[in-house]
Amino acid sequence: AQTVTQSQPEMSVQEAETVTLSCTYDTSESDYYLFWYKQPPSRQMILVIRQEAYKQQNATENRFSVNFQKAAKSFSLKISDSQLGDAAMYFCAYRRPSQGGSEKLVFGKGTKLTVNP
Amino acid sequence: DAGITQSPRHKVTETGTPVTLRCHQTENHRYMYWYRQDPGHGLRLIHYSYGVKDTDKGEVSDGYSVSRSKTEDFLLTLESATSSQTSVYFCAIRPTGGRTGELFFGEGSRLTVL
């Protein structure tokens, strides 16, 4: 079974600085999908960024970027120019390629990010 | 906005009582999911559905059942609630046709079992 590990239960960053959240996963597949979700205090789960394993180029969405190291099975999230609104729980998630269409997301346990003014 | 509504948003109940949580979507997506979120565990899949009357178990399905009689509604039932089922429950949909298969979530339902 696939597992997703987030080794940092909590992180903190100063406003305007850069922070990197770690994620590793275990899989025997060569093609798969990876995601980062953000959960602010409102509890809403918000998709931040996605990465397709066959793409070597790291995904970027504005201030959010990933460092995808396929051989190392590592998928870290970098937040640049951190803002107070970035404070949230961040979850890393993995999905196998579709086999009949019922593939599920497997989530890590999350990293709580605090942004200090 | 993925058009997902969960109800109720908050519920307090007593051990041994039945509870049903409802997930309603407005966009006719085929795939729907129920996750629970607990501190230190992230989100864990309870059950999912891949069409009307087509459902399957996730990793933490014991004590839960689901039903999907219409495309737009996916119900999660706790036949006899226990304190270990105190949690935040999230419904999610996977948009049809998307390659990467990301999920979009409802706002969550907080259930407290006393």
Image: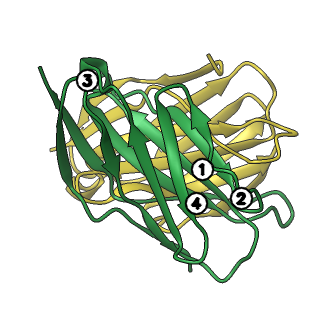
Chain colours: A green, B yellow
How packed mark 4 is, by other alpha carbons closer than 10 Å (few <14, some 14-19, many 20 or more), is: many
Residue under numbered circle 4: A94
The image quarter in which residue B8 lies: top left
Q: Amino acid at mark 2?
A: Gln
Which residue is painted at 24% across and 59% down in the image?
A8
- Pointer 2: what residue? A56
Please tell me which residue is depicted at 75% across the width and 48% down the height of the picture.
B100
In this view, the residue in front, B45 or A68, is: A68
Q: Earlier in the sequence, mark 2 or mark 3?
A: 3
Quarter of the picture holding the C terminus of chain B: top left
Side of A59 where A21 appears, left or right: left
Q: Nearer the viewer, mark 3 or mark 1?
A: 3
Q: CA distance from mark 2 to mark 3?
A: 28 Å
Both on one chain, marks 3 and 1? Answer: no
Query: Residue B40 falls in which quadrant of the image?
Result: bottom left
Which amino acid is tagged 1? Val
Residue nearer the viewer, A111 or A84:
A84
Q: Which residue is mark 1?
A: B66
Q: Chain of mark 2?
A: A
Question: Alpha-carbon distance for marks 4 and 2?
Answer: 17 Å
At 28% from the left edge and 50% from the top edge, which residue is drawn?
A111
SS of the residue under disc 1: strand
Marks 4/1 same chain: no
Q: Which residue is mark 3?
A: A16
A107 shown above or below A48: below
**Is label 4 or label 3 in front?**
3
